[in-house]
Image: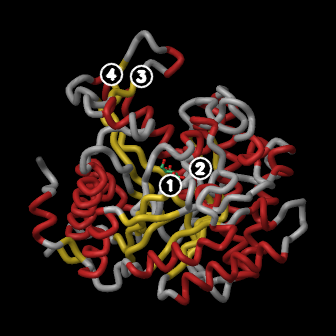
Amino acid sequence: MLSFPPGFLWAAATAPQHVEGQNFNSDWSEWEQLPGKIKNGDSSRVACDWWGGRWREDLDRAQTLGMNAQRIGIEWARLEPQPGQWDAEAAKTYRDIITGIRERGMEPFVTLHHFTSPKWVAAQGGFENPEVAQWAARYADRAAREYQDLVTYWITINEPNVYAAQCYFFGLWLAQKQDPPAAFRVLKNLIHAHAAMYHAIKRVQPDAQVGYSHHWRVLEPLNDNAPLDRLMAGLYSRILNNVFFTAVHDGVVQFPVGWNGKIPEAKGTQDFLGVNYYYQEHVAFDISSPGDLFGRRVVGPDVERLHRYFEGAGNLDPGAFYRLLLQLKQSNKPIYITENGFVETDRDDQIRYMVTHLQAVYQAVQAGVDVRGYFWWSLLDNFEWSEGYTPRFGLYHTDFETQVRTARTSAQLYERIVRANGIPDDLAAQYPLKN
Ligand code: BGC
């Protein structure tokens, strides 16, 4: 058996817009109603009906699998529907949910911002407006006062790099701008917001463990011996992976072009690294793509098939996950894998993904990387942003007509791993790390 350290946290992750439904005050809820935004015209209006109370049965499921932690989010748009106005009823519902997590023997990890903002924030320019840092800090302060008796682990912002890229660089979500200077401005404001939220929580709750969830994309040269491929992979990786990370690590912001400088209050504003990892991509130099800074992302032959299930799929290479974790060892911070997961397909991709990626985590732990927890994305099939209900990341299948959940093989397998606090030999033999 490949055993994990005692006390290792085994969990799953969700976020408000994915599961709650009836979230009428967020910018996403408004935007998704515009024609053509969401695949098949789906809407997050009902989602997994957590706001209707189904969080109870889903947390029961997590408990049944033996999990000892759970990641959820709280929704800024519900708690502060108007500037400075706190919604006591919404706050009470989240108190019930977080208490429900604790009552089921699980440690709550609570995210404050997972891509969605109140409409009033969006109406004032959202994260393009530098004032957003103060607003976010006021919200974080209030949330910490409200739940400090229940929550130790706070995640300020989920995947700031993805948010900036999707909304302001690729023009896909919400603000839908293809405007690199705006994307860098937004990233800078996200750094300020994270730092302000970190300090706000620590003022209320000095013992809290505060971090953010960073989306890591392993971007490697298509041809290791081609200097231009190496250059492009390095550039892409710097933009996507390193700008935010470095700012939070040492307070220095280094954009490849444009503004560079210091945000001293951001330095050291994380007590742990929240790592979201999904897949790897190769990068090649391409003279014909100036709009993409002369780079091209190249994915393997399997990807076309995987795209039928999840548009975002890149190369599923658990070795890349291992290499990433080894690199992060240098930060000397505890690491929680706050998201890792894959969709159910017509093959056994989901369980293969789970067992091989957990072996990568195991190897990293063996190599001295301080990984303390693993959160599978996601507990159940849910509303997956602009792809609606098509990609199915859940340990549980959700029938969105009837709201009936059915355990997948991945749930059974995860339960075996969780209860053993390790990967049983037969699973490791069936899904070897290298094949
Ligand atoms: C996001 C989740 C999302 C997942 C799968 C992550 O980047 O944090 O909200 O569902 O990817 O696409």
Q: Are marks 2 and 1 in contact (CB under 8 Å)?
A: yes
* Colouring scheme applied when the structure was drawn: secondary structure
Where does residue 125 sit, x and y in percent of width and height?
Answer: 82, 41
Question: Disc 1 to disc 4, how far (Cα)?
Answer: 27 Å
Q: Return the residue at label 2.
A: 160
Ligand 1 under 8 Å from disc 2 Cβ: no
Where does residue 320 sit, x and y in percent of width and height?
Answer: 28, 48
Ligand 1 under 8 Å from disc 1 Cβ: no
SS for dot 2:
helix
Question: Disc 4 to disc 3, how far (Cα)?
Answer: 9 Å
Q: Amino acid at mark 4?
A: Leu
1 lies left or right of 268: left
Q: Amino acid at mark 1?
A: His
Q: Are marks 1 and 4 in contact (CB under 8 Å)?
A: no
SS for dot 1:
strand
Question: Disc 2 to disc 1, how far (Cα)?
Answer: 7 Å
Residues 188 and 372: in front is 372
Closer to the eye: label 1 or 4: 1
For label 2, count other residues whose C-alpha is less than 10 Å away and answer few (under 14), some (14-19) or many (20+). many
Q: Return the residue at label 3.
A: 295
Q: Return the residue at label 1.
A: 214
Question: Disc 1 or 4, which lies upstream in sequence?
Answer: 1
For label 1, count other residues whose C-alpha is less than 10 Å away and answer few (under 14), some (14-19) or many (20+). many
